[in-house]
Image (cartoon, rainbow, N blue to C red):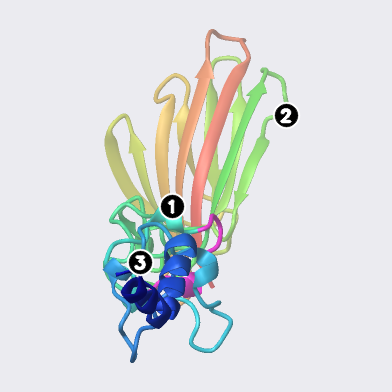
């Protein structure tokens, strides 16, 4: 019996040594062929970044096919790392409330004017400006206080008398200018020649008024102005408060 046992040991010594090392140190099994490593061959959470070939090397890095659809979110993207070239310019790429060059607060960019008229299709582009002024005068001040010059359309002046205050527009140009005027809710229209004038506001009769002016014809040079004026005097002989604002649009 003992002889048979010794003979068995001698004939299987190599196998027992291999078994000993396998049980004591672990073992690696060589897999034949390609594409033979599957998910059950890898211990969970044991593949690290260092185990993935660097994307700077040929055939390295992970591709789109390696990522589950919808698996990349904000937390996977470094702050300030994306540029314009990284974002596709197609419908649906940005939210409906996003601020872009073509959409601001849900309004098409053609609806905004930034100092040079309108960019709306089929309309012309002109130069616009906003002119405003305010002054407090007392009776006896110079009879005329220049508020502002309106390019190609004349001037606005402020006046303070003992019994009232007023704002006037005068046509200081050599041309005939179209005039529309609102006084106490009623509109009137007419033509005003050189040195003609119109009162925009009168502290006693209409303390606030609107004046619209126009000159020229399409396709030539044109000028438009909308003037709002306000005049106040508390009692006779008191100081006068006057202010005016003109929105001006011109095209040469």
Residue 85 magenta:
yes
Dot 2, how many residues are within 10 Å of its Cα: few (below 14), some (14-19), or many (20+)? Answer: few
Mark earlier in primary sequence (2, 3)? 3
Residues 138 and 174: in front is 138
Stretch of the chain drawn in magenta: 78-88
Image-quadrant location for residue 80: bottom right
Residue at which label 2 appears:
142
Q: Position of residue 99 (x, y in %)?
A: 40, 55
Q: CA distance from mark 2 to mark 3?
A: 96 Å
Q: Residue at x 67, y 18 (%)?
A: 139
Disc 3 and disc 1 in contact, CB within 8 angstroms: no
Residue 42: give its label: 3
Q: Position of residue 167 (x, y in %)?
A: 53, 33
Q: CA distance from mark 2 to mark 1?
A: 70 Å
Q: Residue at x 40, y 39 (%)?
A: 210
Residues 207 and 67: in front is 67
Mark earlier in primary sequence (3, 1)? 3
Mark earlier in primary sequence (2, 1)? 1
Residue at which label 1 appears:
75
Quarter of the picture holding the N terminus: bottom left
Question: Nearer the observer, disc 2 or disc 3?
Answer: 3
């Amino acid at each position: 019996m003992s002889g048979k046992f010794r003979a068995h040991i001698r004939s299987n010594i190599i196998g027992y040594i291999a078994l000993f090392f396998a049980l004591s140190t672990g073992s690696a099994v060589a897999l034949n062929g390609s594409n033979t490593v599957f998910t059950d061959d890898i211990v969970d959470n044991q593949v690290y970044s260092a185990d993935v070939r660097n994307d700077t090397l040929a055939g390295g890095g992970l591709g789109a096919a390696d990522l589950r659809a919808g698996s990349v979110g904000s937390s996977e993207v470094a702050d300030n790392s994306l540029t314009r070239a990284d974002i596709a310019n197609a419908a649906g790429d940005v939210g409906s409330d996003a601020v872009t060059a073509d959409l601001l607060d849900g309004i098409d960019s053609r609806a905004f004017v930034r100092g040079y008229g309108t960019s709306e299709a089929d309309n012309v582009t002109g130069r616009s400006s906003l002119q405003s002024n305010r002054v407090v005068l007392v009776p006896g001040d110079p009879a005329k206080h220049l508020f502002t010059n309106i390019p190609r359309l004349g001037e606005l002046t402020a006046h303070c008398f003992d019994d009232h205050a007023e704002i006037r527009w005068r046509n200081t140009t050599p041309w005939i200018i179209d005039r529309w005027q609102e006084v106490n809710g009623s509109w009137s229209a007419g033509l005003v020649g050189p040195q003609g004038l119109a009162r925009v506001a009168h502290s006693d009769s209409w303390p606030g008024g609107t004046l619209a002016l126009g000159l020229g014809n399409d396709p030539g040079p044109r000028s438009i102005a909308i003037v709002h004026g306000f005049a106040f005097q508390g009692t006779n002989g008191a100081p006068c408060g006057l202010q005016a604002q003109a929105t001006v649009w011109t095209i040469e």
